[in-house]
Amino acid sequence: MDTKNLTAACVLLSVGLGFGLTSFYGMNVGSALRMGPGYFPLVLSILIASIGAAIGIKALTVSMPFRPQVAPIRAVAAIIVAPILFGLTVRGLGFVPAVALTTLSAAMAAKGQRPLAALIIAVAITAFCLAVFYYGLGLPVRLVGPWIGV
Amino acid sequence: MTVDLISNLALGMSAAITPHNILFCFVGALLGTLVGVLPGIGPTATIAMLLPITLSLSPETSLIMLAGIYYGAQYGGSTTAILINLPGESSSAVTALDGYQMARQGRAGPALAAAALSSFFAGTIATVVVAALAPPLTSIALRFGSPEYFGLMVLGLAASIVLASGSVLKTIAMVSMGLIFGLVGTDINTGAMRFTLGRPELADGLNFVAVAVGIFGIAEILRNLETTIERTAVIKRVAGLWPSRADFKAMIAPACRGTALGSALGVLPGGGAILASFASYALEKKISKSPDRFGQGAIEGVAGPEAANNAGAQTSFIPMLTLGVPANPVMALMIGAMIIQGIVPGPQVATSQPVLFWGLIASMWIGNLLLVVLNLPLIGLWVRLLTVPYTVLFPAILAFASIGVYSVNSNTFDLYVMAAFGIFGYVLSKLEFEPAPMLLGFVLGPLLEEHLRRAMTISHGDVMIFLNRPISAGLLAVALAVLSIAFLPTIAKRRKEVFVEED
């Protein structure tokens, strides 16, 4: 079994089936003459799913070890959470706290990062972003948002 | 013809040489180099991360700044390739072969200067090539109908599949996924919502910048966090920047050959710049009197590929400017920026927006000039930047990216899209899927569908329309030939060899 390509096949099959079923059942497919909104996506989904199936079948017949080098789960979480935090807080808390939280989260991704160091990095980057984006480029944002009551 | 060329270039120069535009071209080149110098971050990721900053500017200034970022990023990639043997992208992998050896022999200065000067030389020639070729190609392109456009885009996608590294089947799947992600949102023909999961934010489709930053920027940062990167650059100080007279003599011919190769190959849709630098290296090695010096620090092995790379980067603007079809992911980003600015890319841009069109072409040359002026004296600064710990740099990159993505539409949903595509892109890269063709598909998805539908309506549902029209039949035949070549076993083997980086 080739785990890497089997996983790849699963990704392709789920994308292909997900989009394919949605286009087939949720949309008007139409005909080649009058293509509905579902026609082209359906064709693409079938292609993606078939490639997935082909890769999957081949992966079942060969044997290959798969030990990818992956970033530590803490790093992945800290990086992915960072933009989400920004999205959740930029309206409510305002620009400054949002950037600070984002950089703080991202700074914690580094291996063995001490909280104090992360805090210093976050403060410095926030000040830099404030200068560049707010004062320099004139980004229309509220510096401090309604949640803090200002 | 020549008079036209000169007057057009003059128009472009007058548009590009305003203090305002030069300033932004300069800032772009500076920022591009700054981010491009960061190890492991190539031009595509750099542009994706910096793209949002340009969107608040006027269309001309924004595209000029983007072009500046592009050249800066490319040059930054060569710098890291030479100094610490970490090419930012596959096209500067070739530069690393001899450039890094030169740096180890204490000749980092001449290597960097050779890269900068031959790039500038190539850029100057290629700017004229673009200016000369763009108008005739535009007039041909204006006669294109939907079947021709469809054929052309299929050819572009086919070429990107062949030039990508890794499995051909997986790359086809990536292109198709890109196409289908591009279709999310309101169907322009019927107004039906597609794949929006009931979210009103998705009615206008997935935000292109968010997808690009996620797939290239976030995934790139995650890859860099896998290991603690050792970045004790071998060079503490770069002394003796200027190449010797003998170096100059050795550089000139390879730079000329590289320029010619790069200009020709760059026009091909699907990423000719990469091909050009490999081809130039192979050529120089073949015709050299002492081929065994290659890989041991031969200056020809830096000058030739760098010239080819830069010429190719320049002429890859041709399909984008004349046809609205991106030749590589960077051009896909440019097209994305144009669309956000309200400009429909295509042959009509040259006539409807001559100032923008020629201003962009002229700014290519100015960008190249600024790079030489800016980077050679500042080399010491860039070297020092390599010693800034990555733990400080990537939170800053993430903050810029988040602010940038948000500022495009002031839409918080885009940040969630960015996070989702970041993790998706990282998983895909672990499964050895190439991200670049997906981005190309993403940009072309709606266009490809529209032209397919239109062609089918014109022909009353007869697929033969694509084969009855000579141009579209020709384009599709070439696409088919290109694709079948990729499947040939001997070529497949060679592709593997070409893309394996030599240690």
Image: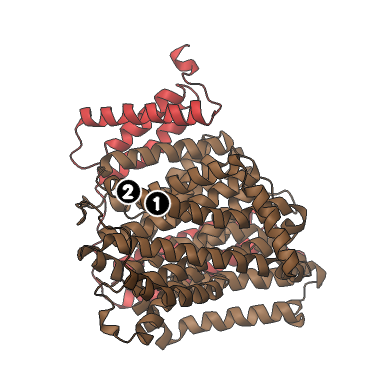
Q: Residue furthest top?
A: A150
Most foreground residue, B112 or B178: B112
Quick check: B260 left or right of B353?
Answer: left
How many numbered discs? 2
Judged from the image, the secondary structure of the residue bearing numbered disc 2 is helix
**Residue B198: mark in rendering:** none
Examine the image and state in which quarter residue B280 appears.
bottom left
Judging from the image, mark 1 belongs to the subunit labelled B
- The quadrant the N terminus of chain A occupies is bottom left
Please state the horizontal and vertical placement of residue B135, each as a whole percent of the image: 72, 66
Please state which of the two labelled residues, at mark 1 or mark 2, is closer to the viewer.
Answer: 1
Quick check: B410 left or right of A93?
Answer: right
Q: Are marks 1 and 2 in contact (CB under 8 Å)?
A: yes
Judging from the image, mark 2 belongs to the subunit labelled B
Indicate the colour of chain A: red
**Mark 1: which amino acid?**
Asn
Q: For the point 77% across and 72% down, which residue is it?
A: B461
Reading the chain from its start, which is encountered first: label 1 or label 2?
1
Q: For the point 52% across and 56% down, which residue is it?
A: A18
Mark 1 lies on residue: B375
Indicate the colour of chain B: brown
Examine the image and state in which quarter residue B108 appears.
bottom left
Q: Pointer 2: residues within 10 angstroms few (<14), some, or many (20+)?
A: some
Mark 2 lies on residue: B382
Please state the horizontal and vertical placement of residue B211, each as a whole percent of the image: 50, 49
Quick check: B227 left or right of B443?
Answer: left
Question: Is B463 placed above or below B332 here?
Answer: below
